Amino acid sequence: VKLIASLPRAPSSAAADRGTGLHHFAGLVIAGAAPESLVGKQHSNYTLNSIDARTALLPAVAAYGRFVGRAKNVTLERKVRIAQHVWGTADILGHHKGVGLVGDFKFGSGVVEAKSNEQMLFYAAGALIGKQLPPSTSALRLAIIQPANRKVLDEWEVDAKRVREFGAEVRAVAKIALTGNAPLHPGDKQCAWCPAEAVCPVRKSVQG
């Protein structure tokens, strides 16, 4: 964690800019904007085009409607925190009749599943720990909304107890990771998206 923090921030990519832009425009449409009125508008170095509006934005917003249903207490872009320096932003957060709703928009090409998705469990745990969901929440419905997926909306329901246990696991690991002498265990899976992989001395020693 400290090695990553010492590195200069990497520039954004076109794919990341597109995702950020579509997240923004999805929020505007959910708030009532007409999709066609947004074509040609720019956000985060991305300009919404008619193809993305038709094949990505509209399916995502329609799936959002199916996911939240009649829930009234739904907000977008909510910051959730599990421990100090350990936080994330849930795209969709709400609750309905004792069930917490946690959703994430994915505008990439690789299909992501909701079942046992650790990112979604992280958001759900953070929302429970931060009391952004009612204490009476007994279960959570986690959703990935991804137009690249044929079914667009992928959902998974999990018991609140399991989510709290996951949050406790994350807090325990974070406590170790944030120390000055945290152990390093390199490997293909955990290093794949790490910005410090190229300069990590332990990773280099393993690779020879």
Image (cartoon, helix red, strand yellow):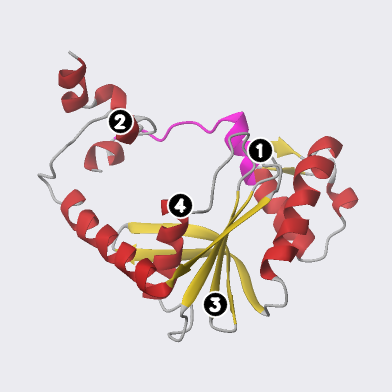
Determine which residue is flagged by label 2.
Answer: 196
Disc nearest the viewer among 3 and 1: 3
Q: Amino acid at mark 1?
A: Arg
Q: Are marks 3 and 2 in contact (CB under 8 Å)?
A: no
Left or right relative to 204: residue 141: right
How many angstroms separate mark 1 from mark 2 (CA)?
A: 24 Å
How many angstroms separate mark 3 from mark 2 (CA)?
A: 39 Å
Element carrying mark 1: helix
| Residue 99: image tag | 3
Disc nearest the viewer among 1 and 4: 4
| Residue 117: image tag | 4
Stretch of the chain drawn in magenta: 7-20
Q: Residue 163, located in which quarter of the rendered image?
A: bottom left
Mark 3 / mark 4, whichever is N-terminal: 3
Residue lying at 28% horizontally and 58% vertically, measured from the top left: 170
Residue nearer the viewer, 91 or 124: 124
Residue lying at 42% horizontally and 79% vertically, measured from the top left: 131
Determine which residue is flagged by label 1.
Answer: 18
Answer few, some or many: residues within 10 Å of disc 1's Cα (few below 14, many 20 plus, some between 14 and 19).
many
